[in-house]
Amino acid sequence: MPVETERKTVGTGSVVTLTWDNAEKLNIVNSEGIGALTLAINELEEDDSLRALVLRGKGSKAFIGGADINEMAACDPESAEAFISRLHGLMKAIRECRVPVIAAIDGYCLGAGMEIAASCDIRISSDEAKFGMPEVKVGIPSVIEAALLPRLIGWGKASYLIYTGAIIDARTARDWGFVERLVTSVSLPEIAAQTAREIAEAGPAAIRIQKQLLRVWEEEPLEAGIESGIEAFAAAYETGEPQAMMQAFLENKKKKKGAA
């Protein structure tokens, strides 16, 4: 069950696409797959050329169709805790990745798949995707990064999904605020790549500072988030990036004015 890695040079660095390939089983994840994906993401942490990461499932039938029920059915309380902790570790690696992570979602995005998508910074979905949290239908609660859902779609909608195990279509997921962009299945890879390019063409230090700041905004009270922003703004100037990029912008604007 390999993780395919594709790297493209974009802007001042590179964009990496990680594709989870368990397509014969709707790209479900077991302990082996969770470990492989976590390792692939963690290995990118030391890559200073990385500008954005795209996460997708192999084929068009599923992004990630959930966690492996065969493995979970054999769990006892101790092994269940170990399994869910490993799964949380994968999602934590996604959330703590230094660059934005884009989920390119096609087909089924269920349970652990929806939680993995929720852990990403941006979600782009095909109009054929299906979303749901069906854990209660097999006797387990939705846990770990399911806690992100009320923040993304509101308490009522999150409660509806989690209590009923209902499956919603891509348009509903977009209307509810879970998905940022809705595209065709055919155009999904290019739209995800285009979004990654837009990020890669921005200031790399600014993007990494911005991701850290967004995490603060998510977790801290409003006033603390604002104060952190002041510190982040000043810290950006320590990199020299604003000075260089603003000067280039002003020089380019001057050239265009002279040419006119």
Image (tube, grey):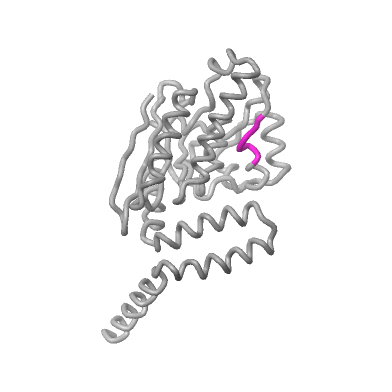
Query: Residue placed at 40% from the left, 62% from the top?
Result: 202
| Image position, residue 137 (x, y; %) | 66, 22
Q: Is residue 247 left or right of residue 215?
A: left
Magenta range is 142-147
Q: Check if residue 61 falls in the magenta segment.
A: no
For the C terminus, which image quadrant? Answer: bottom left
Asked where in the image residue 4 lies, by quadrant, the reply is top left
Query: Residue placed at 45% from the left, 62% from the top?
Result: 206
Query: Residue placed at 60% from the left, 42% from the top?
Result: 172
For the N terminus, which image quadrant? Answer: top left
Residue that lies at the very extreme toward the top in this rendered image: 74
Q: Nearer the viewer, residue 59 or 224?
A: 224
Q: Is residue 130 left or right of residue 135?
A: left
In this figure, what is the number of numbered marks? 0
Q: Which SS does the magenta portion mostly show?
A: helix
Residue that lies at the very extreme toward the left in this rendered image: 259
Q: Vertical placement of 93 versus 139: above or below? A: below
Q: Check if residue 146 falls in the magenta segment.
A: yes
Query: Residue placed at 32% from the left, 51% from the top?
Result: 14
| Image position, residue 74 (x, y; %) | 58, 13
Q: Vertical placement of 168 versus 180: above or below? A: above
| Image position, residue 27 (x, y; %) | 45, 27
